[in-house]
């Protein structure tokens, strides 16, 4: 093998490696956060808390998009105040302004990070991939509570507000939608 061919093979290997790493970055980040608790990973539950305290906490909501995601995405309300242990319900609004269906998945975090394990999601749009049709606007719910044991934690008991942030990333369309998208593109050409 000539030196030029060796250089070409090395360069191609680097390009393939970088492409693979960028493709895997969102799922890897979500897995890493769930395993390590980094980024304020939340807990989940099938139902609300049995205990509701007389103490309140502010929950702030934030929404952003990966730079290649064509949707608009924002919280309907920026902040609520709930009792600790009380089930809260918030909505985020997403809109697909394109002329094609677009699939997305939300990654999330909670700040301050110490509050992550006390912020419990009962139901969340982030548990599933979302597909929006061309021009579609939806409101997506998240139901949650703050675990009453937060008041006994040495670090978390001084937290008076929690910020729940979501970032939507575009993902490949599920198989059924991909066929519709291909068919629509062929019909308009």
Image (cartoon, rainbow, N blue to C red):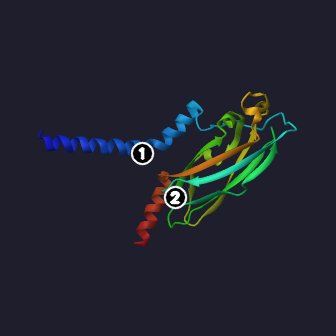
Pick whichever of labels 1 and 2 is earlier in the sequence. 1
Please name the residue that numbered disc 2 is placed on: 102
Seen in the picture, residue 59 relative to 118 is either above or below; the reply is below
Q: Nearer the viewer, residue 24 or 66?
A: 66
In the image, residue 50 lies at what x, y percent?
82, 34
- Circles 1, 2 touching at the beta carbon (< 8 Å): no
Question: SS class of the residue under badge 1?
Answer: helix
Question: Which quadrant holds residue 75?
Answer: bottom right
- Can you tell which of label 1 and label 2 is closer to the viewer? 1
Tell me the residue at 81%/45% (across/down): 82
Pick out the residue farthest to the left.
Answer: 2
In the image, residue 23 lies at what x, y percent?
42, 45
Seen in the picture, residue 110 relative to 36 is either above or below; the reply is below
In the image, residue 167 lies at what x, y percent?
57, 50
Image label count: 2
Pick out the residue farthest to the bottom.
Answer: 189
Q: Which image quadrant: the C terminus?
A: bottom left
Question: SS class of the residue under badge 2?
Answer: strand
> How would you rate the neighbour count of disc 2 (Cα within 10 Å): few for under 14, some for 14-19, many for 20 or more?
many
Q: Which image quadrant: the N terminus?
A: top left
In the image, residue 102 lies at what x, y percent?
52, 58
> How would you rate the neighbour count of disc 1 (Cα within 10 Å): few for under 14, some for 14-19, many for 20 or more?
few
Q: Nearer the viewer, residue 18 or 96?
A: 18
Question: Which quadrant holds residue 120?
Answer: top right
Q: Is residue 7 left or right of residue 169?
A: left
Distance between the alpha carbons at the discs numbered 1 and 2 = 19 Å
Pick out the residue farthest to the right.
Answer: 54
Q: Which mark is residue 88?
A: none
Please name the residue that numbered disc 1 is placed on: 22
């Amino acid at each position: 093998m000539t030196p030029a061919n060796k250089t070409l093979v090395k360069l191609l290997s680097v390009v393939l490696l970088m492409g693979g790493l960028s493709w895997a970055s969102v799922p890897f980040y979500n897995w890493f956060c769930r395993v390590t608790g980094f980024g304020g990973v939340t807990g989940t539950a099938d139902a609300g808390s049995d205990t509701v305290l007389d103490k309140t906490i502010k929950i702030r909501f934030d929404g952003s998009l990966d730079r290649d995601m064509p949707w608009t995405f924002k919280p309907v309300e920026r902040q609520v105040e709930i009792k600790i242990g009380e089930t809260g319900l918030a909505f985020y609004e997403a809109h697909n302004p394109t002329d094609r269906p677009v699939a997305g998945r939300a990654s999330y975090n909670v700040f301050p990070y110490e509050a992550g394990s006390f912020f419990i999601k009962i139901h969340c749009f982030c548990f599933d991939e979302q597909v929006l049709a061309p021009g579609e606007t939806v409101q997506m719910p998240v139901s949650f509570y703050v675990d009453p044991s937060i008041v006994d934690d040495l670090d978390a008991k001084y937290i008076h507000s929690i910020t729940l942030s979501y970032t939507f990333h575009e993902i490949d369309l599920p198989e059924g939608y991909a066929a519709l998208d291909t068919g629509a593109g062929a019909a308009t050409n």
